[in-house]
Image (cartoon, helix red, strand yellow):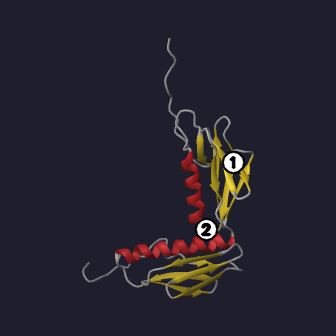
């Protein structure tokens, strides 16, 4: 079929973002500002992307069908959705510590981890992130910025990743560890 141009919409980008009551979204210049009960987030966006309000929803539009612009379309829709969800309900990740004598505790704004090394690890808790420890081996990291919650979780997990033989270490709550058999006993 010559002469017919088919417009391919992004599967993610075409879905409107619903804005709950109490959340204020503003687009000024090339900056998205989302403010809600949990906090305030900012995000710069590309000029080939436009945002349109439709009642209590926001649609993301693009200027052309270039490959990069199509990629921005889905990206900025998801970033906006994450910002709205973050300032209204927030995000959380759960880490589980496994190992004999391994434990964690919060002292003020510092997370203290005893994870099998000769010295304890001290992790500073940044502003906008809250960390709670349940029963000494379950760490709940929560905040309104999804990227920062994920980054702090990854940094803590990196201190002692789970090993495949006994499963000792720090892992995500929903993470499955593939276990190895190890050596068999000598006869």
In the rendered view, does 103 fall on the left or right side of 49?
right
Q: Is mark 2 on a helix, strand or loop?
A: loop
Nearer to me, 85 or 95: 95
Residue farthest to the top, as pictured: 187
Q: Are marks 2 and 1 in contact (CB under 8 Å)?
A: no
> Could you tell me which residue is drawn at 50 percent across and 27 percent down?
182
* Count of labels in the image: 2
Pointer 2: what residue?
145
> Could you tell me which residue is drawn at 44 percent across and 73 percent down?
10
Nearer to me, 1 or 57: 57
In the rendered view, does 92 fall on the left or right side of 3?
right
Nearer to me, 172 or 55: 172
> Could you tell me which residue is drawn at 59 percent across and 38 percent down?
168
Pointer 1: what residue?
138
Q: Where is residue 141 in the image (x, y as percent from the top left)?
A: 66, 57
Nearer to me, 2 or 127: 127
In the rendered view, does 69 fall on the left or right side of 27?
left
Instruction: Quadrant for the N terminus, please.
Output: bottom left
Q: Position of residue 15 (x, y in %)?
A: 53, 75
Dot 1, crowdedness within 10 Å: few (<14), some or many (≥20)? many
Dot 2, crowdedness within 10 Å: few (<14), some or many (≥20)? many
| Residue 74 versus residue 116 in the image, above or below | below
Alpha carbon of mark 2 to alpha carbon of mark 1: how far? 21 Å
């Amino acid at each position: 079929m010559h002469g017919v141009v088919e417009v391919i919409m992004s599967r993610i980008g075409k879905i409107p973002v619903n804005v709950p009551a109490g959340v204020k979204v503003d687009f000024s210049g090339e900056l998205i500002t989302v403010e809600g009960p949990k906090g305030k987030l900012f995000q710069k966006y590309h000029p080939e992307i436009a945002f349109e309000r439709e009642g209590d929803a926001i649609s993301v539009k693009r200027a052309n069908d270039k490959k990069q612009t199509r990629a921005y379309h889905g990206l900025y829709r998801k970033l906006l959705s994450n910002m709205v969800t973050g300032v209204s309900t927030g995000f959380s990740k759960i880490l589980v510590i496994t190992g004999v004598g391994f434990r964690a505790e919060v002292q003020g704004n510092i997370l203290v981890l005893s994870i099998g090394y000769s010295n304890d690890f001290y992790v500073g808790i940044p502003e906008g992130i809250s960390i709670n420890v349940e029963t000494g081996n379950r760490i709940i990291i929560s905040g309104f910025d999804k990227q920062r919650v994920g980054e702090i979780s990854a940094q803590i997990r990196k201190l002692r990743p789970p090993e495949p033989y006994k499963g000792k270490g720090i892992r995500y709550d929903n993470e499955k560890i593939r276990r190895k058999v190890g050596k068999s006993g000598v006869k």
